[in-house]
Every structure is written in structure tokens, then in C-alpha cells.
């Protein structure tokens, strides 16, 4: 499953960073594009399951979904696309090119202090 693979990759990254910092991770912030089919709940559940018994046990995942951008073919401006009203913010043009969706990345890890 997609989410399980992501969870495994996140676990590996967080564990590596935790080992480097010699600290216990408590939360992690992830971001991904709007078109990414990651299901937050499924990902959190998968992560919880594989993190059990590891240093990452109890780490809370926070997932931010980044908006999708498009570039207008008329005025070249880059804007956030709204699927309910897909047009350029500046010139209201409807000719545009979708920009690549943001990849799923681990933004930051919060460690236990004190
Ligand atoms: Zn435009």
C-alpha cells in the first residue's frame, strides 16, 4: 500500500535524524501536494503501527496539503488554482499549464526537550 511505503520512509528518516541528534522525536511535520493521493488518517495509522516499539513510537504526524499552482499562458503569472473556478487570478485567462504537484516531504521534526 502507498501509505505504508511512505510511513516506512518517514520512519527511516525520522529515526536517522533522531539518532544524529540523540533526542526523542515527538512530532513530525510533512507536506505534500494537493493531487497526492495520501490519506492522512491511513498514513498516521500506518506510521503508528510500524513505529511501535521503535524510537518513533508516539510521534505525531502533521500533514499539510499544499495548493496546486498553474502558470497562465497569456500573462505568465503563477497562481494557485481553484478547481471550482480554474482561471488566472490576474487576467482571468483560462489558458494555463498546471505546474508539478508538490512532492511529499518531511518538513521538520520536533524533539523532546529537557
Ligand atoms: Zn493570466
Image (cartoon, rainbow, N blue to C red):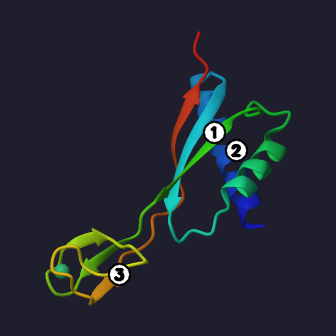
For the point 86% across and 33% down, which residue is it? 53
Quarter for ligand 1?
Answer: bottom left
Q: Which mark is residue 48?
A: none
Mark 2 and mark 3: span between their CA atoms?
Answer: 37 Å
Mark 3 and mark 2 in contact (Cβ < 8 Å)? Answer: no
Residue marked by disc 3: 86
> Residue 18 location in percent, x, y?
63, 30
> Residue 107 location in percent, x, y?
49, 45
Residue marked by disc 1: 14
For the point 41% across and 69% down, which residue is it? 68
At mark 2, the secondary structure is: helix
Q: Which numbered disc, 3 or 1, marks the residue that appears first in the sequence? A: 1
Residue sitting nearer the eye, 22 or 101: 101
Q: Which numbered disc, 2 or 3, marks the residue that appears first in the sequence? A: 2
For the point 72% across and 66% down, which residue is it? 2
> Residue 70 location in percent, x, y?
32, 76
Residue sitting nearer the eye, 86 or 71: 86
Instruction: Choose mark 3 or mark 1, whichever is in front.
Output: 3
The answer to whether residue 3 is left or right of residue 91 is right
Mark 2 and mark 1: span between their CA atoms?
Answer: 5 Å
Residue marked by disc 2: 11
At mark 1, the secondary structure is: helix
Amino acid at each position: 500500500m502507498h501509505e505504508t511505503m511512505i510511513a516506512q520512509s518517514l520512519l527511516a528518516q525520522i529515526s536517522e535524524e533522531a539518532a544524529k541528534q540523540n533526542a526523542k522525536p515527538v512530532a513530525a511535520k510533512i507536506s505534500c501536494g494537493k493531487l497526492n493521493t495520501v490519506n492522512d488518517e491511513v498514513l498516521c495509522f500506518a506510521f503508528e503501527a510500524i513505529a511501535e516499539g521503535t524510537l518513533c513510537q508516539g510521534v505525531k504526524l502533521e500533514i499539510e496539503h499544499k495548493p496546486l499552482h498553474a502558470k497562465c499562458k497569456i500573462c505568465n503569472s503563477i497562481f494557485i488554482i481553484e478547481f471550482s473556478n480554474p482561471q488566472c487570478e490576474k487576467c482571468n485567462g483560462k489558458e494555463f499549464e498546471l505546474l508539478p504537484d508538490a512532492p511529499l516531504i518531511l518538513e521538520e521534526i520536533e524533539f523532546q526537550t529537557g
